[in-house]
């Protein structure tokens, strides 16, 4: 009965679910992604769906994303209604639910957290994700990319902290399943389209260096300063063009800085003419290789081919989209599976 209530609630929103629902099992299941406003393209819907399925399969956590077409009179109340419906007895564990509710017309977002996940997603963490990760994308009008990037941070937090060990098990009578976790913030979706995210620092402070590793160390300073200037002298010309149309957030930079610092001591550098690669051990699946171009001024980071050639799966593990590229020379001693994932070093 409760599960039917959830399906009725979602159906009452008149939400198009194509491409956003798992294949139907024997009993109806609520959709993991509902986009009434049609802000997500089919590819984004499939990736968000895959992320949600990965959380459910690997950690027993259900993430539901709902994008409203009409502004909610009270977004907090709407979130509670949907979260209570998700807590149906014949659905997944209500205490291990995440609800990402987006109100583009009302320019608000809400991330609701199940009480068993409060140790993983503190109010401070949720507020930082919303402010530093979601808003920069939404303000650029890139809702789909913002949702995807937010889900990636949630998955990363779960993997770092360990969902099973960190989640609380309070037992006893079930209180409100969300436990009051989460936060609501204003989100001027599309309000800053075309504008760069401000965090200015003079390009001369980030100059190319004589070796790829030294250039990578300077890039760590860029990340630490949360500098988002697309025209840094540290970047190749193609990279500068790429960053002018790409949203970079504080959350992304903090995550990249943390991962990179953790493995920098294991970096290996390979040079072939005016191309270079810095790679890390094959089992460091969350830290991809970095590509460089040589120039008269020094070694430049080459992010455009990194973006085109390096992909991440639902657990934030990197792989190549194809193996016939100019930077593959640095991986002659590695083996890859048919999906481009590194297997082992010889």
Image (tube, rainbow, N blue to C red):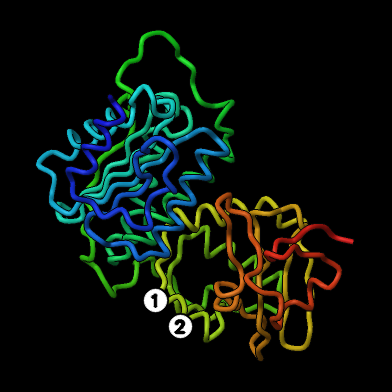
Of residues 125 and 166, which is closer to you in this image? Answer: 166
Q: Is residue 32 above or below residue 107?
A: above
Circles 1 and 2, Cβ within 8 Å, touching? The answer is: yes
Quadrant the N terminus occupies: top left
Where, quadrant-wise, is the C terminus in this rendering?
Answer: bottom right
Please indicate whether residue 317 sits to the left or right of residue 128 in the image.
right
Q: Residue 305: x and y, percent?
A: 59, 78
Residue at position x 13%, y 44% in the image: 72
Residue at the farthest front position: 26
Relative to 230, residue 267 above or below:
above
Image x and y of residue 345, in percent: 85, 60
Relative to 69, 120 lies left or right: right
Return the residue nearer the eye: 341 or 235. 341
Residue 289, quarter of picture? bottom right
Helix, strand or loop at mark 1: loop
Packing grade of label 2 (10 A; few <14, some 14-19, many >=20) is some
Picture coordinates of residue 97, whole percent (x, y):
40, 32
Label of residue 245 in the image: 1
Alpha-carbon neighbours of circle 1 within 10 Å: few (<14), some, or many (≥20)? few
Judge whether 154 appears above or below 208 on screen.
Answer: above
Q: Looking at the image, how many numbered discs can be counted on the residues?
A: 2
Marker disc for residue 241: 2
Q: Farthest residue to the left: give it.
A: 73
On the picture, is 214 further left or further right than 2? right
């Amino acid at each position: 009965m409760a599960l039917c209530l959830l399906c009725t609630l979602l159906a009452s929103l008149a939400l198009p679910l194509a491409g956003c629902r798992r294949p139907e099992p024997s009993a109806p299941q609520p959709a993991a992604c509902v986009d009434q406003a049609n802000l997500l393209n089919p590819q984004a819907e499939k990736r968000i769906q895959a992320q949600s399925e990965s959380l459910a399969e690997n950690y027993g956590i259900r993430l539901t994303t709902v994008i409203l077409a009409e502004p909610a009179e009270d977004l907090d109340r709407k979130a509670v209604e949907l979260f209570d419906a998700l807590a149906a007895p014949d659905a997944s564990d209500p205490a291990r639910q995440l609800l990402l509710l987006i109100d583009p017309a009302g320019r608000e977002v809400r991330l609701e957290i199940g009480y068993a996940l409060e140790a993983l997603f503190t109010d401070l963490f949720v507020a930082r994700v919303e402010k530093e990760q979601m808003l920069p994308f939404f303000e650029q009008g890139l809702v789909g990319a913002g949702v995807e990037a937010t889900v990636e941070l949630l998955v990363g937090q779960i993997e770092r902290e360990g969902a099973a060990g960190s989640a609380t098990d309070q037992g006893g009578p079930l209180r409100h399943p969300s436990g009051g976790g989460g936060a609501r913030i204003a989100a001027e979706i599309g309000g800053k389209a075309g504008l760069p995210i401000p965090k200015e620092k003079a390009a001369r402070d980030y100059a190319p260096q004589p070796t790829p590793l030294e250039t990578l160390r300077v890039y760590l300073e860029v990340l630490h300063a949360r500098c988002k200037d697309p025209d840094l002298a540290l970047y190749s010309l193609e990279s500068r063009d790429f960053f002018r149309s790409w949203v970079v957030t504080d959350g992304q930079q903090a995550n990249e800085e943390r991962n990179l610092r953790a493995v920098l001591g294991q970096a290996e550098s390979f040079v072939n003419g005016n191309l270079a690669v810095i790679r890390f051990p094959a089992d460091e699946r969350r830290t991809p290789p970095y590509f460089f171009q040589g120039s008269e001024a020094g070694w430049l980071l080459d992010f455009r081919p990194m973006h085109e050639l390096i992909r991440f799966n639902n657990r934030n593990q990197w792989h190549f989209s194809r193996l016939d590229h100019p930077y593959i020379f640095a991986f002659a001693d590695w083996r890859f599976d048919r999906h481009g994932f590194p297997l082992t070093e010889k």
